[in-house]
Amino acid sequence: MKLISAINEEIRIIKERDPAIHSNMEAFLYPSFKVMLHYRLAHKLYLKGHYFWARYISQRAVRKTGIEIHPGAQIGKGLFIDHGNGVIIGETTIIGDNCTLYQGVTLGGTGKEHGKRHPTLGNNVMVSAGAKVLGSFSIGDNSKIGAGSVVLNEVPENSTVVGVPGRIVKRDNILVPQEEMNQVDLPDPVKEEICELQKSNQELIERVLELEKSIKELTR
């Protein structure tokens, strides 16, 4: 019964988060479906100290899906991995409930830490395609990591991170429902700064033109 319940839950998550899935049967072909069932079994074996068999199962999942989840990772309810190829989740990673990861995401370490060396994601976190979150720190609840970002430091809840290295752009402290989270509607702080500079430059030009006009009138 537990297996059937797990299967139904994975089907529900996939159908809710991916509009390209039109039937329960299609969900069986989805990489996220396969890898999460493998992970749940591998994680149980890992907790019991059966490390070889846990890794054996997880490595079989890698070959089938292109998604590598270490069996030691702690993953909450409702994780959705969209497409998924190239996703890597390290051993001491902790992922909260209702998170979404896209293809090419790495939740990894820097190679310098011991013990807890991978990131902790809160609830309702979205990590966009190609983003890298490296190190032992937390990503707060309801936060978004923009596509291609490299995050190396703590991220407060209700925040958006973009760029390399990742820069935090605070948002209003309002819970963003999972169905409204996407990879497109993210702020671009570099673009915003350029726009501010262009605005300041235009104001300076207008002031110079006004001064030139005043000087001409005085010298007539």
Image (cartoon, helix red, strand yellow):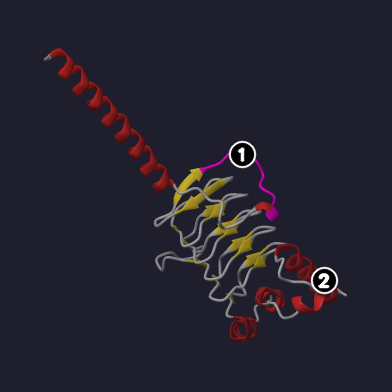
Q: Position of residue 187 (x, y in %)?
A: 50, 48
Residue ranking furthest to the right? 1
Q: Position of residue 149 (x, y in %)?
A: 46, 59
Residue at 59% in and 82% down: 62
Proximity of marks 2 and 1: CB atoms separated by less than 8 Å: no
The C terminus lies in quadrant: top left
Q: Position of residue 117 (x, y in %)?
A: 49, 64
Relative height, residue 192 to residue 86 (above, below)? above
Residue numbers of the magenta segment: 170-179
Residue 196: image quadrant is: top left
Give the structural element (helix, strand or loop) at label 2. Answer: helix
| Classed neighbour count for the residue bearing mark 1: other residues with Cα under 10 Å, few (<14), some (14–19), many (≥20) | few
Q: Amino acid at mark 2?
A: Asn
Residue at 63% in and 69% down: 82
Q: Nearer the viewer, residue 80 or 48?
A: 80
> Label 1 belongs to which residue?
173
Horizontally, residue 90 falls left or right of residue 174, namely left
